[in-house]
Amino acid sequence: GNFSFGDYFKREAIHWAWEFLTDKRWMGLAGDRLSISVYKDDDEAAEIWLRDIKISPARLERMGEDDNFWPAGAPTQGPDGVCGPCSEIFFHTADGGSVEIWNLVFTQFNRVGNPPNNLRPLPSKNIDTGMGLERMAATMQGVDSNFHIDILIPIVRAAAEVCGLKYDPSAESGRRLRRITDHVRACTMAIHENVYPGPNKEKYVIRRLLRRAVLDGHQLGMTQPFLYQLVPVVVQQMKVPYPELQETTERVAEVVKAEEANFLSTIDAGLARIERIFGEMERQQRMHVDGREIAELYQTYGVPPELFESMAAEKNLAVDWQGFRDAMTQHGETSGKIAHVVMGDTGDPLDALKKAIHETPFLGYEVTESPATIRAIIARGHLCDHVQEVGHDQRLIVVLDHTPFYGESGGQVGDSGVLEGEQYRFEVRDTQKHGALIVHHGHLLSGDMKVGDRVTARVHAERRAGIQRAHSATHILHHALQKQLGSHAQQQGSKVDEDWLRFDFTNMTAVAPEQLSAVQADMEQRIAGNEPIRWQIVPLAEARQAGAMMLFGEKYPDPVRMVSMGEFSRELCGGTHLKSTGEVRAVEILSEEGVAASTRRLVVLTGTKASEHRQQTRAALQEAARVLNNVPLSEVPAAARQWAQTVRELKRQLASTAKPTAAAAAVQRASQDAPISDALAKELLRHAARELNVGPFDVPKRLTAMRDEIAQLEQQVANRSQVGSVTAEQLLAGAEKLGNVHVVIAEAPSSNANLMRQLVDQVRKAASPCAVLLGAREGDSKVTLIAGVSRDLEQQGVHAGNWVRETAQVMGGSGGGRADLAQAGGSQPDKLPAALQHARQWVGQVLTKST
């Protein structure tokens, strides 16, 4: 494209675009295959095209502001600011289609307010044109898609190969492969420039693109990371204009693989949740998705909201972006995390309530139940005086004159409970703060409710107790971190829920396992000490003098609420707490990870959930020991490692052309268990999980699968040993000669695809010209075929992909691939002899034609 700020304008831009497109020194396109559009009121541009360029009036079209104005629809819809008409150039293909290849934007106005007379001429008129580089390449190369040009089609084909597919442009899989190509190329370039996938701004864009591509691959059957394999292909295609890409190929691939693995770890659960959402919407005949559900998918499963939006669009469903924005705000996420979320006052009725009611007094430090009066009700985004029973289909907001319900703030989640009147029952599902207002979100389950009613506001006391255990534990944790790591380990954010907490803090490096153990031990010591927890309202200066923890960047009121735990902790905090540290009961550090530069995150369980987690940990370790032939608990990690080594050795033998040998038996001796502590049980299970590359509670399931896998692999090794190994020399000894070509067509008993590929390569190296096709039966319902031809035969037009596909069809199968090497499969093993005979006939005919 080209720009001008007050220098040249429409005439020059139009002339130069036409010259570049039609002059034989440049693109050399035929002028009669181009057509033009202009804005309906842009007589100046139309005159230049008709009189200067001499375009036929039949090939000039005037269009409205939605098509030929920038920004689209600006004259009537806005926004205010610089804008102007456009002129677009289209190329018409031989089959009657057309593609826009250039857009000339004439920014000549400043929009001020609504029509009429809202387009004010700029003192300096500007040009901003853009030509589609890849569209132009497609036009010049005569292909029907940007993705089919010479620099992109190799990546598309590589993506298809990695996914084990044949690229079909018209199929749904073809669309997904093209999107994978587009995204992996963009991300390769960005990550090379150190824009890594992450939660904020440009990093979020890269994460969203990668996860969209991962989802496409997952829907094509890919359950393991695969995108990273395409990075070298992208580099190969782009290395001429960007040779520096070759210096970072490995690093970029590692980053892509890590992001893939991260998303794949949650994608199945996320997709299951999405399907439940869609199913529920269909049953309820809802047309748009609740924004809270979108936020949950993003926060819990890592599903970017834009990705979810595209999935919803496929089902003709809209998404509630306003609700999503609210949910993200309520959960403490910054607006920068999601680039398209625009914050602002949208006339929320709560804003009007803030002016009328100002604030809601909070009684929850002393009580969890109290009488109150309804001050306001909001239904369907509107204030109303009266509502009747609406059930769970409609969420209402209720504001009271005072309340024991804690509104989410300071990292502590909002309370739940009930509001009960004489004639109705309102279920409070969540409590939030809107400025100084405390607002109760929920459902009217029965009866009629109106403003002015007296209610009994009752907090779910058990849930509140769990939240308080977690919140008091954050203060204990904060102290323990500073004691073990240093005073720099200051809180950077937290979330506190029922017996669960997330705590972010400053630390340059990961916290070592022994340090984590010391932190947990210190917390347990404070809990065992059962030290009193007190709070008091004091002047800010007095709190500072008392040494209360104050977080950098926080704004504190004066006076402030200071929470003290024994003599070891003083923090300024507005949340609810226990009466003593002993009431926390138990703590269990679940995980430690980095979330940003110099910021680490701990996830910790307390109380009931901590106790349950310990029981689950011990049960999982005991089950793992049972699966491992009843080894002692202390030997579970070593036994798991031995099984993993056994699997690798068996696979190595099966992939080798050498005759397999007996594998080391994956059997451990049984011995007497010695008692182990909860801490040791947790460490043993985590160690085993690391050996198996799964989550701790997935260890028994993985070991069970591994046991079955070992049995299957051992049977395959035994089968190979009984029938003997096939070698390249044996295959060549049985080769047929068609002219001067060595033709090898044979069954390779008990082989797999990798082994057959090795044999094909060995034969091609030993004899040339040659054509090789091997088949192997796998059980009663599967056959794998591998075909390859030497380079000289490939140059003569012999295509391995066509050969193997034709052969597979005899067995009810399909497949294909490259001209030099290809794979196919069939579902009728009993027809393998007939298929091999067909392969002989087919290659004989092709070789006869090629000579």
Image (cartoon, rainbow, N blue to C red):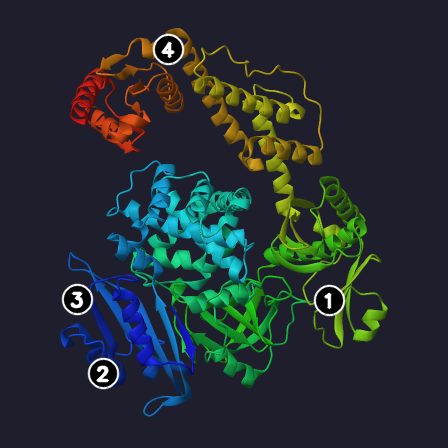
* Circle 1 SS class: loop
Where residue 81 sits: x, y (%)? Answer: 43, 83
Residue at which label 4 appears? 729
Where residue 467 sits: x, y (%)? Answer: 63, 57
* Circle 2 SS class: helix
In the rendered structure, which amino acid carries the disc numbered 3? Asp
Judge left or right: residue 483 versus residue 716: right
As drawn, 590 above or below 140: above
Q: Which residue is pictured at 83% across the width and 56% down the height? A: 568
Q: Nearer the viewer, mark 3 or mark 1?
A: 3
Q: Nearer the viewer, mark 2 or mark 1?
A: 2
- Quarter of the image where one finds residue 305: bottom left
Residue at which label 3 appears? 32
Question: Which numbered marker is on residue 552?
Answer: 1
Q: Earlier in the sequence, mark 3 or mark 4?
A: 3
In the rendered structure, which amino acid carries the disc numbered 4? Glu
In the rendered structure, which amino acid carries the disc numbered 2? Glu
